[in-house]
Amino acid sequence: MKSLKQRQLINTCVHILLVGACLVSALPLISIFTYIVLRGAPGLSLHFFTGLPQPIGEPGSGMGNAISGTFVLLGIASGIGIPWGLVAGIFMTEYRDTRMASCVRFSAELLSSIPSIVIGLFIYEQIVLRMHHFSALAGGLALSIIMIPTIARSTEEQLLLIPAHIREAGLALGLPRWKVTCHILLPGIIRSIMTSMMLAIARISGETAPLLFTAFGSRFWPESIFEPIASLPIQIYNLAISPFEEWHQQAWTGAFILALFVLSLNIATRLVMRQKEPLS
Amino acid sequence: MVKGPVAHRKKEVHRGDWLFAQFIQAGAMLLIALLLALAWFLIKGGWPAIERYGARFLFSSNWNPVLEVFGAAPVIYGTLVSSAIAIMIAAPLSVSVALFLHAVAPPKIRAVFSFFVDMLAAIPSVVYGLWGIFVLAPWLRSDVEPWLSEHFGFLPFFQGPFYGVGMLAAGLILAIMIIPSIFAMCSEVFRSLPVTYKEAALALGATRWEMMQIAFLRAGKRGIIGGIILGLGRALGETMAVTMLIGNRDEISVSLFSPGQTMASVIANEYAEAGSSIHVAALIEVGLVLFCMTILVNALARIIIRSDDAI
Amino acid sequence: MSILHAKNIHAYFGTNHIVKGISLETEPHQVTAIIGPSGCGKSTFIRCLNRLHEETPGARAEGSVIIDGENIYGERVDPVSIRRKVGMVFQKPNPFPGMSIFDNVIIGLRLTGEKNKEVLASVAEESLKDAALWDEVKDKLKTPGTSLSGGQQQRLCIARALAVEPKILLMDEPTSALDPIATSKIEDLLSKLKKKVGIIIVTHNMQQAARISDTTAFALMGELIESGPTSSIFTAPRMQQTEKYITGRFG
């Protein structure tokens, strides 16, 4: 049996260790934030948002095409991924406790655990090879596959939170089931669904791996969704692994913009969630 | 079994409801079809390599696109070692942080710290990679690796020239990236534990550390382990930051200072430039192995977490 | 002439036989109360009267219910159309989340195609007046329905049910989640409402049944023990079980 003194000594040591762990974990975080701001912010200018990348040595490089390209990709991905995820989520609640619903849930779980690079491979073989070139559409599709499980799961969770008697009240008014689901239940959880959409968009906006051989990249403004398209993450990657100091600087600025975008989406989501009204 | 006097009557279905049912069923089926298509593609695309190399593919350590010889052992080794480094660093750190914040720290500090960790989780992988290349790797090369070599140089892991980028850098960046996920899981577990455990332990005269062992670590064991394994799953498939930091050399080397390659990074690096069809097939087979590995790891984590609920 | 005639209703949950052949007839402009101990199948029974019971997975019902000369359990009858004639108010007040008071009332009409704003506004006003809620909410129709008090929410649900002009209103223990004041408001309301719609109310509160109903039916273990004018059920019940129940000796 240990004496009380010994036990208290151990207790103190553990506390010191725990505080140490917090400090050690916080260090890289602080370092990353500091570097992004210190090295990224100075390169910011209006031109950076509106200009095109220039060859090395020429001034006035911008990431306008990459930023707009990222938005195009997000648009395509959301256009496919959000409705699909919603439908899958609705299916899982409408058919809850059936084998099919567990099958769909299981598929969504598997899909969410697949590394994004593998999804990129898949889209490359199925879409890019068939269309014979890289395209924004392929990139958007790859990103949408990453979104679907997230949206589906949160839609299901939120719908299941609605008490059964709310649905019954809708049915008792003489409304068909689908109207109850689409016009009464879904609008009631629209805020939660929006937050999960925002989080899903925030997540895919930084995805790089699935875009490597789908959207590929481009030095020009986006013109068609059937052409290769530039995107912020890919651009950052290409600049970062280049041998030129000047491009490294641009990579930091790009990272600053990307991180700012993703973090503001996350913070905005938190604000929306905080004022969520409770379900009756 | 009680049977009704009349046989079960077929339900009339409203026409709009029927259409709606068809629609959502189609969406759900497509999701299953997508998963099957993915699995089918990986098997079919990798088949030439599976056929040609068989099980040797997994164990041969010679990966040479020029000679068209493909053995995946170096990339599997790279994936396992970099993830192992990440877990060994991230697991104790994130569990400690979660424990400290939930058992010791006042709620205000917990909220602030959790917020920052969540932000850390949101940062894109390519940004981690950028930071890794320009901050972490130079620091490893100039300070950490010489120090390790001087004090632990007798171990084979810490020998050889200092590159900065390499297995150690990849493991460290992965550790930093998975700390938030493991922390989030542990926080969730700790939050769901009843306060009465804590109070009961303290009432027995336990010191705070003893209380933490009883009311947090032991009570939340399965959730914590599940969370760590989920973190491992994330590390295995992580691509960009690792690709930027591991050095990209398809060889097995015991030293953690030397460059390596993971399954994800070899695909990212070589797929677009793969010249021969057997190279493409070999890369897809690597994708297949990675796919199976992450699915197994995630399934394992979920089984562990779920069996916790049953208790 | 009865307004609703249920004949030999059987209801099941999986293999559980909950309602065992209940028949009941109700008159227009009357309140019919169904009383009985909890678990006697009274709630399940009225959920058969608008075919809501069968919406629960694993549940089914048999028998016939004649409303307006039509058997709602007949061949090719769409349950959706049935529920327009038979409104329902639930045990817990359940205004639709995220919807304003106004939207809650008119949602039934709007989703069945009524787009005319003036019609909707007048229906909303009329229904809220019928539910004795108009004066309390007329200045805040745009606020969420869930922001009202429990009693107000329940009257909002009554207004919502009335807005689609049902012939019969089913009420499943509508006051069991409310305080005594809110309860008495709803009880007062019922005596006015019955001029418009036939009311069938399930209650576990015998005093309530005695206060508000014209006819009372007593159910036990899934069967209807007896039914008749409320005054005679409570003063001179024919069956021994009924007497035991209303004098509080069991249940």
Image (tube, coloured by chain):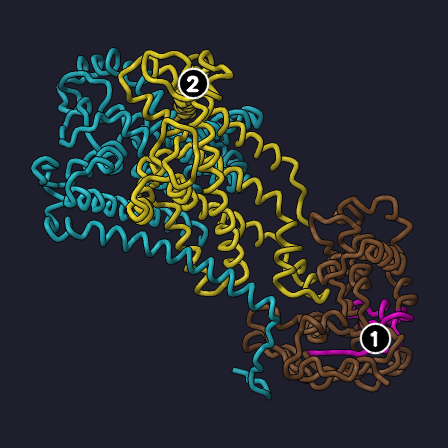
Chain colours: A yellow, B cyan, C brown
Magenta stretch in the rendered image? C194-221
Residue B66: % across, % down: 10, 35
Q: Quadrant of residue C211?
A: bottom right
Q: How far is disc 1 from disc 2 in space, using C-alphas? A: 75 Å
Residue C46: % across, % down: 72, 73
The dot on residue C32 is 1
The chain containing the residue under callout 2 comes to: A
- Residue C198 sits inside the magenta stretch: yes
**In the depicted structure, whether residue B212 falls above or below residue C203:** above
Of residues C192 and B21, which is closer to you in this image? Answer: B21
Tell me: C125 left or right of A185. Answer: right
Of residues B166 and B276, which is closer to you in this image? Answer: B276
Reading the image, the residue beneath label 2 is A253
- Residue C246 sits inside the magenta stretch: no
Q: Residue at x 65, y 82 (%)?
A: C10
Residue type, mark 1 in image: Thr
